[in-house]
Amino acid sequence: MKNKPEFSTRILHVDLDAFYAAVEQHKNPDLQGKPVVIGASPGKRGVVSACSYEARKYGVHSAMPISIARRLCPEAVFLPVRMRLYQAVSAEIMEIFTAFTPDICQISIDEAFLDMTGTDRLFGSIEETGMLIKKTVKEKTGLTISIGAAESRFLAKLASDFGKPDGLHVVEKGSELDFLDQLELKDIWGLGKKTLERLNDLNITTVKGLRDFSENSLKTIFGQSAGGFLFRACRGIDIGMYNTPAKSNSISNETTFQQDINDRDVLERVLLELSHHVMFRTLKENKKSKSIAVKLRFSDFSSTTAQKTLSHYIHSAEEIYSISIELLNSRWNGSSSIRLIGTGLLALEDGDKPEQPELFENEFERKIKVEKAVFRLKTQGEKITKASLLNNKIKPKKE
Amino acid sequence: MKFTCEKNNLTKEISIAQEIISSKNALSILSNVLLEADNNTLTIKATDLKVGFETSIPVDIAVPGSTTVYCDKFLSILRSLPDGDIEFELKDGKLYIKPLFKKINFQLKSIASEQYPEMQSIAEENYFVIPQADLIEMIGQTIFAVSDDETRYFMNGVFMENIEGSLIMVATDGRRLSYIKKNTAGTVKPFSGVIIPPKVLQLISKQSSGEGTIQVAVTEKSIFFKFDNQTISSSLIEGQFPNYNRVIPESQSNELTVKRDELIEAVKRVSLLVENKSRRIFLNLTNGLIELNSEESEIGVATEEIECAYDGTDTLIALNYSYLIDPLRVIDNENIKLLFTESNKAITLQSAEESDYFHIVMPMQLD
């Protein structure tokens, strides 16, 4: 048995402030200090992906329809999402963190947990460590970050939100409840809108008030798992947040159209593009799957999902595409208008799992090889796009 | 319609009819069995629109006629009745079922036989004749290798073709393939290769006695079998069966002979600890020895050594153990031969003595 380290656990939650907007503002200094909204172009359909703090003052927030953002803040600079750029900057920042600890758990493009347990002698107190990380990131990228420190991931995450933006908040051992009591219920990570409403109905409006309820009564009111979560959350007991690396059991991509679509050519081309994205991400994560699902949302907002499981692993975008078309046909009459279309792989398995090769050269086998080669090139930074994905005027002749 | 017949004679045929009928909806005519009494013969028909079954048994007919009844309940009633003669009478749209000399009376609602789907049929001169035993062997050597992956619908059946007077059956799921060729001395009529759904082949294996002959007729869309008073037909699977000749190894440099039962028993034991999803079992072949190995898992590990005749180079082969067990079960010899070139090329399993069949399996990745 390993001896437990004598150090107390120290977790940092690092959050990049208004990340997309900050990257844009940093790349283009003219935008600094101005409200910046990133998402769909105004006038078109779509939502706000991110916005700068300046825009937030006007009430703009992410997931808000772009048209409303436009109304709230007409002078804002509206920019399209440049995901590749943000990903590159994110990777650069994560690289900076590796100088501080090997134990990094990145949970999204702009958030990570750093386990700093036992690093006191290297970087000093946790405040000093936090300041040093903030300073390094600022120097190297020009971006500001918020850091929360606590003994658990759950509290560290709440602490970083608490200090935002450009904050550093440490929840000292023994002061966890005091920290929690400063928060509003809606600030508790993982507390959904429905639960909040229900709590409000019960006249529970503070974290402290929530602590008056026994675990049993919370479980009776909210059910086993939500009740258990509330009981632990209001006491600052770790809720088991990302204890294991976030495991995605599916990989999917979807597109919402600017205008509803009922043109088969367009739908098929979009599906092909989505299939390529999905295959690329699946290869990148070293996963494989036998199941494909296609999601459709029609103009009346009704949604449907069709899925299919094969007896062999899917290794090519072409195969995802051909099955997606089949699934599309099973749920679409060919004329109703479609608002959203998506495809993805379900029930992902480890990409290294032993495989049963085929006797016959699979019709997709050649394409698998191409797929893997393209993957290699793309990861080396080459730009490759399928001819059929290029938006050219000349359509290939159909046979 | 009114006739009398012995309980067990009828029950046997109705139970076959019930196996074919796939619909379990009491109101659908497809859940019904058709009864047709004429010329002192009762003709029984059942279909799921793909497979059709028709048989006849001698009965005493008082009034000829025909009707259809819900097969599932009809069979339950027949099974429940005491042995002996039963009288059947159609009155006011109901089939009265009355065992003679008993105070039992069932009335089953019927649907008129005119509404029953037309059965496929084919003119007598299209049939050719082969021994039942041959056909049964051919089915047995191949049917287990059929794919159940609907996306590979063209592999969802057994491929049958006539090459220069020999009847060939092949089945594959893309990873293993089973092949049998019977010399028919030119009795088989020429036809182009067809893919036969397994359901009809299972039915024939079950129904036939293995003695005497069976008549077979093949058209572009259907296949017909006639034996012992019964006609069984089936629609065929449309599609292009893969070019199987391409994957049959021309020559394999290594050969190993082993007792069939010993290998089966060893595989069964070692597979107990094989990871269930991949089913990968390792065969380590060395001079005179096969070592079977389950690969260490969370649960544990199993190994077993069995003797064999082998003097080739040491080779490690990984296989899906079902792909090993399935052919071993049907190879009709106490010794089997395993032929291979190297661990990532197809291996062949066959009888140690010359036979009409062989089985090809694609090994799994070693790491």
Image (cartoon, rainbow, N blue to C red):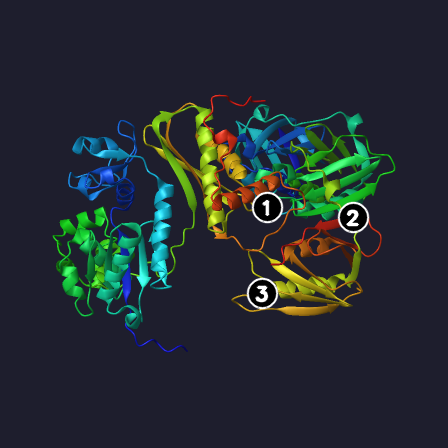
The answer to whether residue A169 is left or right of residue B15 is: left
The answer to whether residue B243 is left or right of residue B188 is: left
Quadrant of the drawing holding the N terminus of chain A: bottom left
Determine the chain carrying the residue at label 3.
Answer: B
Q: Where is residue B193 shown, x and y percent of the image?
A: 74, 33
Q: Quick check: can you spot residue A155?
A: no
Determine the chain carrying the residue at label 2.
Answer: B
Marks 2 and 3, the one that precedes in the sequence: 3
- Could you classify mark 2 by the number of other residues whose Cα lies within 10 Å: few (under 14), some (14-19), or many (20 or more)? many
Report the residue marked by disc 1.
Answer: B79
- Please say if the residues under marks 2 and 1 sit with CB atoms less than 8 Å apart: no
Q: Spatial distance from mark 2 to mark 3, Cα to Cα?
A: 31 Å
Labelled disc at residue B273: 3
Residue type (three-letter) at the residue carrying disc 2: Tyr
Mark 2 and mark 1, same subunit? yes
Is A100 rendered above or below residue A362?
A: below
Q: Where is residue B227 shown, x and y percent of the image?
A: 76, 37
- Could you classify mark 3 by the number of other residues whose Cα lies within 10 Å: few (under 14), some (14-19), or many (20 or more)? many
Marks 2 and 1, the one that precedes in the sequence: 1
Residue at 47% over, 49% down: A284
Q: Where is residue A14 shown, x and y percent of the image?
A: 28, 56
Residue at 84% over, 52% down: B354
Quadrant of the drawing holding the C terminus of chain A: top right
Residue type (three-letter) at the residue carrying disc 1: Arg
- The residue nearer to you, when weighing B12 against A368, is A368
Locate residue A338: give its quadrant: top left
Of discs 2 and 1, which sits in the foreground? Answer: 2
Q: Where is residue B54 shown, x and y percent of the image?
A: 68, 33
Residue type (three-letter) at the residue carrying disc 3: Leu
Of discs 1 and 3, which sits in the foreground? Answer: 3
Q: Spatial distance from mark 2 to mark 1, Cα to Cα?
A: 41 Å
Report the residue marked by disc 2.
Answer: B357
